[in-house]
Image (cartoon, rainbow, N blue to C red):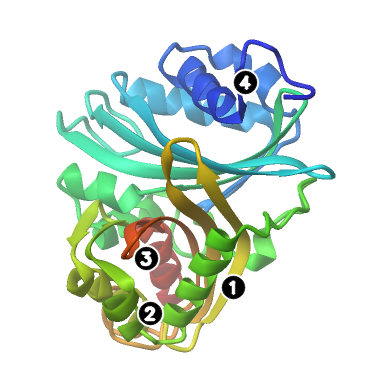
Amino acid sequence: MKGFSNRWKDFPDYIIGITKEIWEDRGIATLHDYYAKDIPVRSPMGVQRGNQAVIASTMATINEFPDRELLGEDVIYSDDPEHGLLSSHRLLTKATHTRDGQFGAATGKHWVVRVIADCAAKNDTIYDEWLVRDYGGMVRQMGMDPRDYSAQIIESEGGADKASKPFTLDSDIEGDYKGRGNANEWGAKYAATLSRIMDHDFNHIVNDYDRAAIGEYAGAQTAIGRDEMVKFWVGLRSSFPSATFTINHQIGMDGDMLSPRAAIRWSLDGIHDGWGTFGKPTGAHVHVFGMSHAEFGPWGLRREFTLYDEIAIWKQILMAQG
C-alpha cells in the first residue's frame, strides 16, 4: 500500500492490526501516530475532535472493561485516488463489566455486541472516522433498559437543558474525507434495497432476501429468517414514518474469500411521529445515525448487519420532552 508501512500486507490487515494494538495490546500511545491530531470522530452520541479525546475515551473504556476483546469480522473498503482508503470495519466486541464507570457500579455481567467503524486513512494515519456502537445491546445485557438508562444520563448531565446533545446534521463538522465510496454493483444493489425498505416496501425483504437470511441488529438482536427481519425494519421505520432517508456513503466489494458484500452509512432525519420500536409518538425531532453491512449469496441477501444507537435516539426523544 502506497504511503503505509510494509509491516501491513493489505488495508484490512492494517485496520485489524492497529485495532488490536490499540485496544487489546494496550498500545494507547500509538494513537498519537495512527490518528491525526485533529481527527473528527462522529458517533450517534456526538462529535469528538482530536486524538486526545480518542485517547481519553479509550482509557475510560479499558478501565471499566479490562478484558474487552475486539474481534474483526470484516473490513469492507474502497480506494479513492483523491481521498484515500475508506474502511468499514465490523467488529464483534465482548467484555465483562468488572469496574465502576460510565455504566455505573460494576455489575459483573458479560456482554457481546457489534461495532461498525468507517475510517478514512492516508499515509499510515486515520484522519476521519464515523462510528456506531451497539450501546443499547450493551445496556440490555448489563440489566438496564435503554430508555431508563438514557434518562439517567440526562439527569447526571444536569437535565435536558444542560445535557450534551447527540449527533445531528447541525452538529456535524467538516472533515478532510470527501469521498462517497465506490461504484461496485453490490454497493449499488444494497443501496437500492435499503432505499426500498425505507420507502416502506417491506415486501422486498420477503421476496428478495434468502429464505435462510439472518439479521444481526441493534439491541444485540438476532433475527432468523425474513419475517423476523421485516419486524426489525418495520419497528424502526414506523417510529419515524415521515423522516428523510439519506445514503451518506456506499461501498461494494467482491473477493477476499468472502461473499460479495456491501457497506452503507445512512441516516433518518425527522419527527418521532409514529408508533414503533421507540414507543408512543412524541413529536421530537430525531436524527438516526445508521450503518449497515450485507452479504449476498445465490438466493439473495443472506446476512445483514444493521446498527444504530438506541441510547442516542432515546436521549433525543427525552431531551425534547424536557
Q: N-terminal of the two: label 4 or label 1?
A: 4
Residue 246 shows which numbered tag?
1
- Mark 4 and mark 3: Cα distance apart in space: 31 Å
Residue 155 - label: none
Circle 1: residue type: Thr
**Residue lying at 38% horizontally and 69% vertically, measured from the top left:** 318
Judge left or right: residue 256 versus residue 85. Answer: left
Task: Give percent across and percent down for residue 3.
Answer: 79, 22
The reply, left or right, for residue 145 in relation to residue 306 is left
Q: Which mark is residue 31?
A: 4
Mark nearer the N terminus (4 vs 3):
4
Q: Amino acid at mark 3?
A: Trp
Upstream in sequence: badge 3 or badge 1: 1
Between 81 and 290, the one lying in front of the other is: 81
Q: Residue tagged by mark 3?
A: 314
What amino acid is labelled 2 in the image?
Arg
Residue 237: mark: 2
Crowd tier of the residue under label 4, counting other residues whose Cα lies within 10 Å: few below 14, some 14–19, many 20 or above: many
Residue 196: x, y in percent? 46, 81
Give the Cα distance between marks 2 and 3: 15 Å
Quadrant for residue 223, please give it. Answer: bottom left
Residue 165 shows up from this direction:
no
Density class for disc 3 (Cα within 10 Å; few <14, some 14-19, many ≥20) is many
> In x, y percent, where is residue 33?
69, 17
| Viewer-proximal residue among 202 and 66 | 202
Q: Residue at x 53, y 60 (%)?
A: 186
- CA–CA distance in space, label 4 to label 1: 32 Å
Residue depicted at x 28% and y 85%: 275
